Image (cartoon, coloured by chain):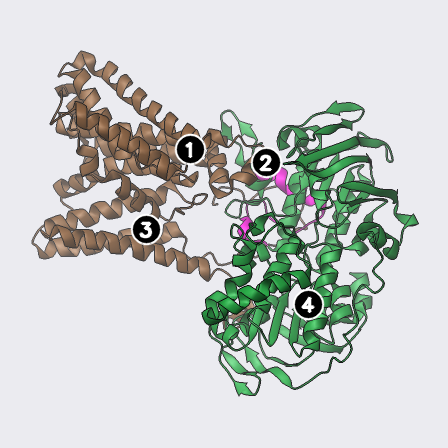
């Protein structure tokens, strides 16, 4: 915690000074380092290809990729922190896209209704997920797997090919920029900020960590454990729905398979874990997740520029995730400081 | 004393009751689980400013009684009155808000959250819709100051705290509810001797403010040190409630077990001889212990004493190859060996009964039989058939109380679980048994069974290394005692030293200095 707590109480001047252990690199630190390495390597490799990594067009491409995956990964972070998982996100994204496109039917006047219906539906799906997980005690993996199958079945039977269309006014969200930054990315960062405030400064955020860390401890402390679980699932579905709407704005028509094409279920989980959040819940940050998403976006962009074979692209993605988690695991093992053999034993005493 | 502060929002005063006044009166509490009565017709009176001891073997109903008061369980019959008002709790929070807090035996803390976040979990102070982190930390600091524990910061992550500090956080959390009654379940189970003193200080401070304490412990010395009144439970029934002054050790043990244990620590079995060295260390060390030399002979119990964190567990782990020695020489029998993994240690004839049976000793959701066969199956698969035939006999010898061999081990009491752990290791026919806190948190009867087993093993020529935080235990059982301090051997004592002699080596101060401190 780096919150401003230093001048806690003016009450005890005689309190012995507490020696802060050298913090070392936090998991967020590691992921930021990986991101920096990815950006530098990306810039070099792109330059070898004779292109400019930092050109406005290229940065816009990268940031655009981060917006949809970012939104979904923020939601996934909340769900994973509370100790659950959401595999239904790609189908929620597809569903909100086709439904909103259908209602809009190219008319600007229909946009508000489309948004309300699409996001309302997404929230309802999250509510069901959350209630199944918390009240029926079905693990999130299974509950949302089932929900994902149901939604994908519904989409497959009712929507073949593209459906409906978004009016130009709505499409502007997907194609406008403020400087080099796409509006969609700013919306995603806004959601990230709200999620950070939620986690750090609201009760439900604190309880989300508590339930994910140890649900029984939370219950014995008087936390109604279903509240954070349902909240996380509703927010996750809402954010997935939001991502679906952004995709609609970019494509201008509802595409019933857009979510599964993006592999948003596994990619969002991968970004969360790469960002240092514990898959078992109870520990992690939104900032890490955003950095994780950015790493994937940079890698994809660079390998796209190099025209890498798609298989190699997946190999690199997979290797990065596994390597990052292996590094985190190693840090957990070596947490207990050695008393002897340490480089400077005097400091390690105490 | 208490520092002057302008605001005292969350710090409990608990001065509602005159000392000696009955705060809580429970009448004929009865509770059954699936037809099995675990508590029947128990009465309890807690008085302001008094410590009420609750003793009994595991399974006697102590935990159930505490959990009813804590609102974790609801009694089938009986009433709980708080200040003459009938109470009925359906959730722990209701009990806490009524002023009854409980410090459970298993820590109920979130390691990844800070001290303050743990204490105020579920009641985070808010300003508007947001959590007031500053105020939360300030209130926490004041709670800690009031308990008289310097050196703990509200924004420290619980993971980075020692066991004793975590205990303090638990108590601070209990106190933060403005608790008038605090139940503590085995609060010293994980503490070293000098830390127990800290806890005593905190408890005395609380009672001085009129808090009533319900104190559950297996350590009789503590019960006599602290308690004004003692209630003894046996098989769910109330055997006695008496002033502590009218009881002594022998009488209390008799009440608890229903029989008198003549000699609590059994004498060596006749014919036990100290034989050839089984295990020798010369100048051995790794990252956690340094320059350790010791010899363990056949038929001998070598005690390892020391404070929490002095490297006792780390020494056993190094011997067992968990984090092996990187320096010095280790001989098993007459061969110099290098144990790089627990597997190699088991092959060399070692066994390790770990400190925390639930985390590292047992697969809780597997059967008794599978647990008891675990080590053999893992290391000597060829001997599984024979072990399977022998295990029932071991269970009979150890008096394991279980319904059936396929019962899940999580449903056994702590003592029986520990016996299952021991049976599993004995099935590997070890020559050297390492035991880390072998009787932690188990009842008197099971303790005695384990002491007797240790004597029988030594009679058969096994060597035992026993780590224990309970001085009477280590003094009563060990043939020699090695005292550790700061990862090194501080000294060695012959059988039956005084507690002072052990403490002196463990703390590195002379007794007079210690009293002054």
Identify the subunit bearing mark 3. Answer: A
| B402 or B333: nearer the viewer | B402
Which residue is pictured at 25% across the width and 19% down the height?
A: A115
CA separation, marks 3 and 1? 33 Å
Q: Quadrant of residue B219?
A: bottom right
- Which numbered dot is residue A221? 2
Residue A9 position in % (x across, y down): 62, 41
- Mark found first going from the N terminus, 3 or 1: 3
Identify the subunit bearing mark 4. Answer: B
Asked if the residue under mark 1 is in contact with the one under mark 4, i.e. CB atoms within 8 Å, the reply is no
Image quadrant occupied by the N terminus of chain B: top right
Q: Colour of chain A?
A: brown
Q: Quadrant of residue A186?
A: top left
- Which numbered dot is residue A133? 1
- Which numbered dot is residue B306? 4
- Mark found first going from the N terminus, 2 or 1: 1
Q: Which residues are magenta?
A: B137-161
Count neighbours of disc 3 (C-alpha within 10 A) and say few if under 14, some if 14 to 19, many if 20 or more: many
Please name the residue that numbered disc 3 is placed on.
A32
Do tags 3 and 1 sit on the same chain? yes
- Mark found first going from the N terminus, 3 or 2: 3
Which residue is pictured at 65% across the width and 86% down the height?
A: B276
Q: Judge left or right: residue A281 versus residue B1.
A: left
CA separation, marks 3 and 2? 35 Å
| B496 or A29: nearer the viewer | B496
């Amino acid at each position: 915690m780096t919150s401003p707590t230093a001048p806690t109480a003016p009450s005890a001047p005689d309190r012995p000074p507490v020696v802060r252990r050298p913090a070392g690199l936090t998991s967020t630190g590691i992921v930021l380092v990986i991101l920096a390495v990815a950006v530098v390597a990306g810039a070099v490799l792109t330059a070898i290809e004779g292109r400019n990594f930092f050109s406005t067009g290229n940065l816009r491409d990268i940031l655009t990729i981060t917006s949809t995956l970012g939104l979904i990964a923020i939601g996934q972070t909340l769900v994973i922190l509370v100790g659950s998982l959401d595999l239904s996100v790609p189908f929620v994204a597809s569903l909100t896209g086709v439904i909103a496109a259908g209602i809009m039917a190219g008319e600007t006047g229909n946009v508000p209704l489309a948004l309300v219906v699409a996001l309302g539906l997404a929230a309802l799906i999250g509510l069901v997920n959350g209630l199944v997980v918390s009240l029926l005690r079905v693990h999130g993996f299974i509950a949302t797997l089932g929900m994902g199958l149901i939604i994908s079945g519904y989409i497959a039977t009712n929507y073949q090919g593209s459906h409906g269309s978004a009016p130009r006014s709505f499409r502007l969200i997907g194609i406008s920029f403020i400087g080099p930054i796409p509006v969609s990315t700013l919306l995603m960062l806004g959601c990230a900020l709200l999620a950070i405030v939620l986690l750090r400064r609201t009760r439900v955020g604190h309880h989300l960590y508590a339930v994910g860390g140890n649900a029984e401890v939370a219950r014995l402390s008087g936390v109604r454990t279903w509240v954070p679980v349902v909240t996380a699932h509703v927010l996750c579905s809402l954010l997935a729905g939001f991502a679906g709407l952004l995709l609609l704005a970019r494509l201008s028509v509802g595409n019933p398979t857009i979510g599964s094409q993006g592999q948003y279920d596994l990619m969002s989980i991968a970004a969360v874990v790469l960002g240092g959040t514990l898959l078992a819940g109870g520990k992690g940050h939104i900032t890490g997740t955003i950095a994780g998403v950015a790493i994937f976006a940079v890698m994809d962009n660079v390998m796209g520029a190099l025209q890498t074979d798609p298989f190699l692209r997946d190999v690199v993605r997979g290797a990065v995730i596994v390597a990052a988690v292996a590094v985190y695991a190693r840090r957990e093992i070596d947490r207990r400081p050695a008393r002897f053999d340490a480089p400077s034993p005097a400091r390690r005493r105490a | 004393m208490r520092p002057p502060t302008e605001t005292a929002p969350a710090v409990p005063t608990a001065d509602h009751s005159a000392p000696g006044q009955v705060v809580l009166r429970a009448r004929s509490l009865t509770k059954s689980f699936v037809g099995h009565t675990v508590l029947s017709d128990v009465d309890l009176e807690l008085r302001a400013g008094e410590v009420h001891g609750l003793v009994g073997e595991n399974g006697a109903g102590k935990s159930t009684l505490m959990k009813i008061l804590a609102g974790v369980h609801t009694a089938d019959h009986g009433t709980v009155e708080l200040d003459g008002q009938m109470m009925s709790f359906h959730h722990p929070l209701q009990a806490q808000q009524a002023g009854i807090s409980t410090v459970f035996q298993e820590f109920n803390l979130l390691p990844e959250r800070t001290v303050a976040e743990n204490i105020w979990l579920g009641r985070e102070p808010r300003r508007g819709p947001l959590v007031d982190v500053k105020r939360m930390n300030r209130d926490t600091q004041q709670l800690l100051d009031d308990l008289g524990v310097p050196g703990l910061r509200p924004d420290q992550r619980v993971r980075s705290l020692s066991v004793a500090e975590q205990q303090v956080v638990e108590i601070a959390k209990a106190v933060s509810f403005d608790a008038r009654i605090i139940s503590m379940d085995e609060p010293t189970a994980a503490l070293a001797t000098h830390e127990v003193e800290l806890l005593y200080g905190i408890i005395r401070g609380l009672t001085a403010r009129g808090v009533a304490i319900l104190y559950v412990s297996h350590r009789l010395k503590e019960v006599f040190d602290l308690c004004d009144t003692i209630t003894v439970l046996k098989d769910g029934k109330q055997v006695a409630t008496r002033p502590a002054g009218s009881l002594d050790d022998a009488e209390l043990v008799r009440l608890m077990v229903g029989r008198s244990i003549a000699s609590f620590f059994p004498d060596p079995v006749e014919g036990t001889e100290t034989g050839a060295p089984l295990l020798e260390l010369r100048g051995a060390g790794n990252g956690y212990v340094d320059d350790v030399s010791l010899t363990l002979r056949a038929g001998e119990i070598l005690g390892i004493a020391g404070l929490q964190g002095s490297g006792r567990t780390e020494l056993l782990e190094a011997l067992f190859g968990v984090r092996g020695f990187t320096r010095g020489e280790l001989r098993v029998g007459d061969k110099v060996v290098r144990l790089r993994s627990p597997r190699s240690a088991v092959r060399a004839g070692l066994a390790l009964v770990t400190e925390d049976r639930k985390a590292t000793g047992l697969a809780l959701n597997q059967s008794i039989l599978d647990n008891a066969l675990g080590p053999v199956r893992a290391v000597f698969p060829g001997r599984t058939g024979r072990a399977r035939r022998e295990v029932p006999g071991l269970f009979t010898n150890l008096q394991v109380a279980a319904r059936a061999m396929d019962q899940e081990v999580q449903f056994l009491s702590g003592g029986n679980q520990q016996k299952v752990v021991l049976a599993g290791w004995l099935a590997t026919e070890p020559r050297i048994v390492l035991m880390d806190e072998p009787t932690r948190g188990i009842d008197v009867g099971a303790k005695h069974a384990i002491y007797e087993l240790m004597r029988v093993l030594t009679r058969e020529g096994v060597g035992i290394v026993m780590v224990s935080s309970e001085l009477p235990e280590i003094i009563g059982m060990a043939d020699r005692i090695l005292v550790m301090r700061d990862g090194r051997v501080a000294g060695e004592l012959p059988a039956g030293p005084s507690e002072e002699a052990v403490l002196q080596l463990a703390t590195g101060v002379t007794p007079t200095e210690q009293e002054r401190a």
